[in-house]
Image (cartoon, rainbow, N blue to C red):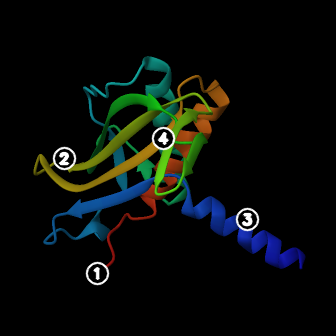
Amino acid sequence: MKLLSVLLGSLLLLSCGATVGVDYDETTNFSQYNTYNFYPTIASGLNDLDDKRVMQLTDSLMQQRGFIKSETPQLYINFYAKESVSNSRNTIGIGVGGGGGNVGVGVSGGIPIGGRVVNQQFTMDFIDVLKDDLVWQAVADADYKEKASPAQKEAHYLAVIEKILKKYPPKE
């Protein structure tokens, strides 16, 4: 029973969160790359604190995968985000209705709960330094609370970057 609850909890966590789409150059041999660094001029659209979070998390995850950060890299990593703010999609519905005979009238509405959320499209590019050419790109769509704490933001970016890097290198 305990195993079943852990399995269901894991499935719930995996089903939520970022969705990731990938595109890449099919002629590229991705096994040749083992060093990386960040693109010299990143204009991410994020604030400086989020830039640092993304870079630290990416460093950690890339090094766990056997990549080496180098001053003379084979790959540059670039990232950027587009964000918009919207009301939470979670609502409580309220309705009133009445009728008699063959006539019915009803009024209903939804009250948003959970506050506003930031809808983020996060893109990560891998650029071949020698060819100066984009060879791999992932785009993740995810949401986080507008008033997220630093720890919540770090958890958000960790989940997004983990999902992105699970798709690298592309499967043949």
Q: Is residue 162 depicted above or below 60 in this figure?
A: below
Compared across the picture, whether 26 is left or right of 142 comes to left
Q: Earlier in the sequence, mark 3 or mark 1?
A: 3
Report helix, strand or loop for mark 1: loop
Compared across the picture, whether 77 is left or right of 127 comes to right
Report helix, strand or loop for mark 2: loop
Looking at the rendered structure, which numbered label has been put on residue 129?
A: 2
Q: Which residue is mark 1?
A: 172
> Callout 4: few (<14), some (14-19), or many (20+) C-alpha neighbours within 10 Å?
some
Q: Which residue is mark 3?
A: 9
In space, the residues marked 4 and 3 are separated at their CA atoms by 20 Å
> Callout 2: few (<14), some (14-19), or many (20+) C-alpha neighbours within 10 Å?
some
Q: Which residue is mark 4?
A: 143
Q: Give the residue at x 29% y 42%.
A: 72
Q: Position of residue 144 (x, y in %)?
A: 53, 36
* Residue 73 appears in the figure: no
In space, the residues marked 3 and 1 are separated at their CA atoms by 31 Å
Q: Quadrant of the N terminus?
A: bottom right
Q: Residue 56 versus residue 88: which sits nearer the camera?
A: 88
Q: Position of residue 160 (x, y in %)?
A: 48, 48
Q: Earlier in the sequence, mark 2 or mark 1?
A: 2
Three-letter amino acid code at disc 1? Glu
In space, the residues marked 2 and 1 are separated at their CA atoms by 23 Å
Report helix, strand or loop for mark 3: helix
